[in-house]
């Protein structure tokens, strides 16, 4: 980029939101520079969805997002819908499929690989004449007296001073630091006196108390469908036992709602009424474990019955039967903490959306400064919702910067 020091738009962060914003700004003829400190763009896109990229969800609404300001996301989601992104998918002939499981209806994945989505975005950037600069760290941002911003960019071998009319922060949150996550966006917001709400890991595995970790260690790797509740919020998906606690889609979902000290309640048999089943089982009076192992993994059954013994169904007292039923339908494991940012898929909290326009994403008190994507206090559920927020916020911002 020798000599290219003046831009209309500079976007910091070459993830999903930043790429979308750059494409749209470039289409409008804006001289656009997209920068990232990583060695390549779109790293989280490549790793998403187990390498298949769950790029959106057909059923998206504000109900699928957590935010202190729950109305903020409505405008962008209405203006750029999943079907708009599907037009891009079809334009680039990318094969995709919808998950067939009833609990995953609406989740769209690439049939081949996540790189298909990144290649689409790269091609659109080229067509829109977007300049992209990787391996580039922004060490300083200042607001010019006559409007716009000056940035100091550099790496080990090169330093540059960049001037731009509009500056877009799409730097993401703190999740998965090995992928290059940092608190840059929050630090910049603080520099311009824009409030930042407390952050914490979201869509993340949970650790159970050490006493439980030991007893449940034998279940590591075992998965089953459950219903998990926290504070009245319920998800019905798969749960996975791990060496330190519990994970899987149901737990990742509820982790965004769980706060330290709060109790989870997990129904290990959401598709059954164990009390009714027990009455039927008493007809042949077989061992309880024999019956339970037909609807639950045997390893789990053996562990859950350790304190009760494995008896014929008629030989349990009323109190024992009620305790077993309660433990299977209303298990309340004590959660100590989460896996943290190292594995969290998203960051909860962030830039206070009350300080940002829901129409343009411009900061209310700083002309020309914009925030989009995960850096904002908007966090989606598992299932393509966070990508749709990235596409929508990036697209809307790209229309005005």
Image (cartoon, rainbow, N blue to C red):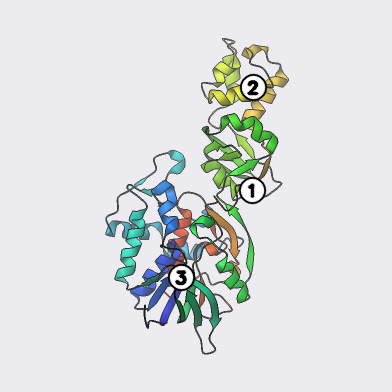
Apparent side of residue 152 relative to residue 395 in the rendered image (left or right)? right
Give coordinates of residue 71: x percent, y percent.
Answer: 56, 63
Q: Residue at x 49, y 65 (%)?
A: 75
The answer to which of marks 3 and 1 sits earlier in the sequence is 3
Q: CA distance from mark 1 to mark 2?
A: 28 Å
Circle 2 packing at 10 Å, graded few (<14), some (14-19), many (20+), is: some
What secondary structure is found at the residue carrying circle 1?
Answer: loop
Instruction: Kindly identify which residue carries mark 1.
Output: 258
Q: Residue at x 32, y 72 (%)?
A: 128
Apparent side of residue 289 relative to residue 372 in the rendered image (left or right)? right
What secondary structure is found at the residue carrying circle 3?
Answer: loop
What secondary structure is found at the residue carrying circle 2?
Answer: loop
Give coordinates of residue 387: x percent, y percent.
Answer: 45, 57
Count of labels in the image: 3
For the question of whether residue 78 can be seen, the reply is no
Q: Residue at x 39, y 43 (%)?
A: 99
Q: Are marks 1 and 2 in contact (CB under 8 Å)?
A: no
Q: Are marks 3 and 1 in contact (CB under 8 Å)?
A: no
Of residues 378 and 305, which is closer to you in this image? 305
Q: CA distance from mark 3 to mark 1?
A: 37 Å
The answer to which of marks 2 and 3 sits earlier in the sequence is 3
Q: Nearest to the eye among marks 2 and 3: give it.
A: 3
Circle 3 packing at 10 Å, graded few (<14), some (14-19), many (20+), is: many
Where, quadrant-wise, is the C terminus in this rendering? bottom left
Give coordinates of residue 64: x percent, y percent.
Answer: 52, 53
Give coordinates of residue 343: x percent, y percent.
Answer: 54, 50
Disc marking residue 136 = 3
Apparent side of residue 369 relative to residue 31 in the rendered image (left or right)? right
Residue 219 drawn above or below residue 277: below
Disc marking residue 305 = 2
């Amino acid at each position: 980029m020798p000599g290219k020091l003046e831009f209309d738009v500079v976007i910091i962060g070459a993830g999903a939101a930043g790429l979308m914003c750059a494409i749209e700004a470039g289409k409008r003829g804006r001289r656009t520079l997209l920068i990232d400190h990583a060695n390549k763009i779109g790293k989280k896109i490549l790793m998403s969805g187990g390498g298949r990229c769950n790029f959106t969800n057909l059923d998206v609404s504000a109900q699928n997002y957590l935010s202190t300001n729950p109305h903020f996301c409505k405008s962008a989601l209405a203006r750029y819908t999943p079907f708009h992104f599907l037009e891009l998918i079809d334009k680039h002939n990318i094969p995709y499929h919808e998950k067939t499981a009833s609990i995953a209806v609406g989740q769209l994945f690439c049939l081949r690989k996540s790189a298909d989505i990144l290649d689409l975005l790269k091609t659109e950037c080229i067509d829109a004449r977007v300049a992209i600069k990787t391996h580039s760290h922004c060490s300083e941002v200042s607001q010019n007296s006559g409007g716009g911003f000056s940035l100091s960019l550099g790496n080990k071998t090169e330093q540059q001073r960049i001037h731009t009319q509009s500056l877009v922060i799409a730097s993401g949150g703190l999740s998965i630091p090995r992928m290059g996550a940092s608190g840059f966006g929050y630090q910049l917001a603080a520099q311009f006196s824009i409030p930042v709400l407390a952050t914490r890991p979201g869509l993340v595995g949970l650790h159970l108390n050490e006493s439980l970790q030991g007893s449940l260690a034998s279940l590591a790797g075992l998965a089953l469908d459950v219903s998990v509740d926290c504070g009245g919020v319920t998800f019905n998906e798969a749960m996975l036992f791990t060496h330190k606690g519990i994970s899987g889609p149901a737990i990742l979902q509820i982790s965004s709602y769980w706060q330290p000290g709060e109790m989870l309640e997990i129904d290990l048999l959401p598709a059954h009424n164990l009390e009714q089943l027990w009455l039927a089982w008493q007809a042949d009076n077989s061992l309880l474990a024999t019956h339970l192992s037909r609807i639950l993994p045997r390893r789990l059954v053996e562990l859950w019955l350790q304190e009760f013994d494995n008896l014929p169904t008629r030989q349990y007292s009323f109190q024992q039967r009620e305790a077993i039923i309660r433990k299977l339908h209303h298990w309340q494991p004590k959660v100590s903490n989460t896996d943290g940012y190292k594995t969290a898929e998203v960051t909860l909290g962030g830039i206070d959306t009350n300080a940002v326009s829901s129409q343009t994403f411009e900061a209310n008190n700083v002309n020309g400064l914009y925030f989009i994507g995960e850096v904002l206090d908007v966090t989606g559920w598992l299932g393509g919702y966070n990508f749709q927020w990235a596409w929508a916020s990036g697209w809307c911002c790209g229309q005005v910067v």
